[in-house]
Image (cartoon, coloured by chain):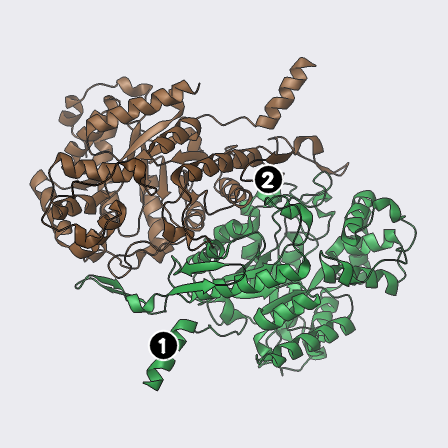
Chain colours: A green, B brown
Amino acid sequence: MTTPAEANQNPTRQHATRQLHLNAFLMSTGHHEASWRLPESNGLAGTDVAHFQRLARIAEAGRFDSIFFADSPVLGGDVGRRPSATLEPTVLLTAIAAVTEHIGLIATASTTYNDPYNLARRFASIDHVSGGRAGWNVVTTAGDEAAKNFSQPGQLAHFSRYERASEFLDVAQKLWDSWDDDATVVDKASGVWADHDRVHAINHEGEHFQVQGALTVPRSPQGHPLIVQAGSSEDGKNFAAEHAEAVFVAHQTLQDAQAFYADLKQRTRDLGRDPESIKILPGIVPIIAATEAEARLLEQQLEDLIQPEFARQRLASLLGRSPASLPLDEQLPADLPHEDAIEGAKSRYTLVVELARREHLTVRQLIGRLGGGRGHLVAVGTATQIADTIQTWFESKAADGFNIMPAVLPSGLQTFVEQVLPILRARGLFRTEYAGSTLREHYGLPRPQSRFAVERSLLGASA
Amino acid sequence: MTTPAEANQNPTRQHATRQLHLNAFLMSTGHHEASWRLPESNGLAGTDVAHFQRLARIAEAGRFDSIFFADSPVLGGDVGRRPSATLEPTVLLTAIAAVTEHIGLIATASTTYNDPYNLARRFASIDHVSGGRAGWNVVTTAGDEAAKNFSQPGQLAHFSRYERASEFLDVAQKLWDSWDDDATVVDKASGVWADHDRVHAINHEGEHFQVQGALTVPRSPQGHPLIVQAGSSEDGKNFAAEHAEAVFVAHQTLQDAQAFYADLKQRTRDLGRDPESIKILPGIVPIIAATEAEARLLEQQLEDLIQPEFARQRLASLLGRSPASLPLDEQLPADLPHEDAIEGAKSRYTLVVELARREHLTVRQLIGRLGGGRGHLVAVGTATQIADTIQTWFESKAADGFNIMPAVLPSGLQTFVEQVLPILRARGLFRTEYAGSTLREHYGLPRPQSRFAVERSLLGASA
């Protein structure tokens, strides 16, 4: 709870025009890789819809902008050592849509291993079912293992994946626009259900896709689901600058986050887009207790439950090395290549290598640092300290908001809502009630006009 | 409500061992193509999740085995003349799963325009989210228009579509079996989440698909979602005999239905399967009123709202002819080919042509007959008459149950539940309460064993 003293420490109420945005990134028992081993955790939470519905309700009670589920169409990691099983996230989001009213619903889906007609239809349907709360985190899915689930011997090159992603998104957006907002006239007397002239074949003829359209689904409440992006390689940043409306990103330091923020906003501006039309949300793993020492103890308890052999295997896979080449009590090998030579998750690779080099970490220490947030900032301390970090990053142009990644779920989310949010509210940084009803409205983003309807009105104006 | 007199007309209670199964086939404002033009109908029902949730609750209150949504990944028909827009049905089912407890949830999905890893994952996820209530109507999707939404110039040949479907289903079933039921051990103390030996790569190497696995989703409550099939061409019947557990089919006459029933049960037996393991459900469009004359009037009111030009276009498309070659007041042309020459919906083609020939219908009359149920049996009369038809077909081995296709929704479903079901119950034909909790249990079908777990226990036995 907020005391007047706390509020007085930060009396400025100058944020009326700049709104902090918070997304709750949900993951079975929490983001710490050992969270499932805690006595409080439900080890089968990953397939328990009631668990996720409860998490969504906690986030909605906290007035979060949205919740988010990551995804990859491959069984990752080591199922022996960590709950890797996940329900398909658009299914999970839909089951949550039915029991919530306000909160935005974002899921990852791959442009490499889906088809644009199917995926556009599914997200448009979720947008209808949720009353305009759907968001799509567009990913290209790194790794040969995923390819092998889709009749392909190995992954496409990084650049090719992004090329395909760009055309995929273009097709999806055309399909979402294939019905004008006012296409369904429902004139029972004359027997006209929809106006033919307002339902458009898209006739897309591209390098990767040829799609006739129209979509089976009329234009959805948001026009387009919110487009989210989460890669920060060169290809990823360029894709984000062109297409994304929200960006999830991992940073270890304020300086890196500021540099990324300035760079991405500039790239967005360079493409003629309003830099306010893209919201940048670094990830943060809050570990909260009444004192900093107690919070450190919580963190240590979790770290003690990490299984180093398993964690080293995952690190080795990210770095493209054998586990044996990474002795636990030595620093990373000196000869790791630049990310240009990596065809997998480029930006995560660089972040991890730079973290290890900057802090001269041994492999064992690096594993401990990554166990909490896989490269995201782990913030350990009191609720006020967490709120201070959020405020500092927000006000110093490192973030438009945060991707909150509780180490342990549901308790970490509950604590954040009960202890950190009141402080942010007292400082005038975060909403007390939802002002709008759609995900776009929560993020202060406009509803896109249909490209086909626009063309029609331009024609009309010139006539 | 049932009177004792009605019950006495059919005093036999001999059906304790043979259970009638009822599926509610749901479609926006109803199955009659003109239903959206009635004053009572919500013309935008097709994108209104609350409408479908209400329908599902009515069917669940009636103790239906399941609800079902058809699907095609193409905007079919003439949007100007009829509500053709549909939400993606697995999304719709999931939104319904969250607000129902018992009723089974079946959706169509195409094996031609999906990928087995994605679809297996989605149905397994729905099965988890619904507590074991998912069913998949496997279709191959006829028509060049669908192909053009998926970067293909035209459809595959009918036989090739079924070949792909068979391998697709094989891959999906392997993926559903890729986790043994007891794979997740969740041993927090030793840090073992799942038993490696009970999670299997499937390493499928086939003609159409190469899939490594395992699935991202642990084995679902039903093991496999219920497999439904709805084509009755030669290819379709062979596919059903090999794979299907429930079959949706259209018949105009009791004799045709009996012949189909005997044929399909025999094909099933010939493949070494128990003929009881496949449930045959002909479609029936009930139009119910207090007297037969009133029911006929209702039917006529709907028929008067049909737009013949539009209906003729659809008929022409089914027959592969131009609309102009089908004068409204003449019978069908004499030179229509055998279904062997048709690459689209073969069995529907034959049903329509035979109906027209048998009853010497003009095109206009044929359109009227098809407007109600697109070739399914339209049963017009009192609740007792409808119940009589159902009982006759059920007892004379034409059906194991019915696919109930109300002409108008929600009213037609509500009337069926309130008026027909009590009669069927009084006759001992239909359940008063759900006996099980999964869709398989409703249909009296076993939970499949995992093929990998079976292999292991065989190995164990020989050791």
What residue is shown with label 1?
A456
> How far apart are labels 1 and 2 at the CA level?
46 Å
Residue at image position (75%, 58%) is: A342
Mark 2, secondary structure of its residue? strand
Q: Secondary structure at mark 1?
A: helix
Q: Callout 1, which amino acid?
A: Arg
Foreground: A98 or B312?
B312
Label for residue A24? none
Image quadrant where one finds the C terminus of chain A = bottom left
Q: Residue at x 56, y 33 (%)?
A: B174
Q: Nearer the viewer, mark 1 or mark 2?
A: 2
Q: Position of residue A60 (x, y in %)?
A: 54, 61
User: How crowded is the residue under tag 1: few (<14 C-alpha within 10 Å), some, or many (20+)?
Assistant: few
Q: Nearer the viewer, residue A210 or A16?
A: A210
Circle 2 sits on which residue?
B210
x, y percent for residue B234: 34, 31
Horizontal relation, residue B343 to residue B173: left or right = left
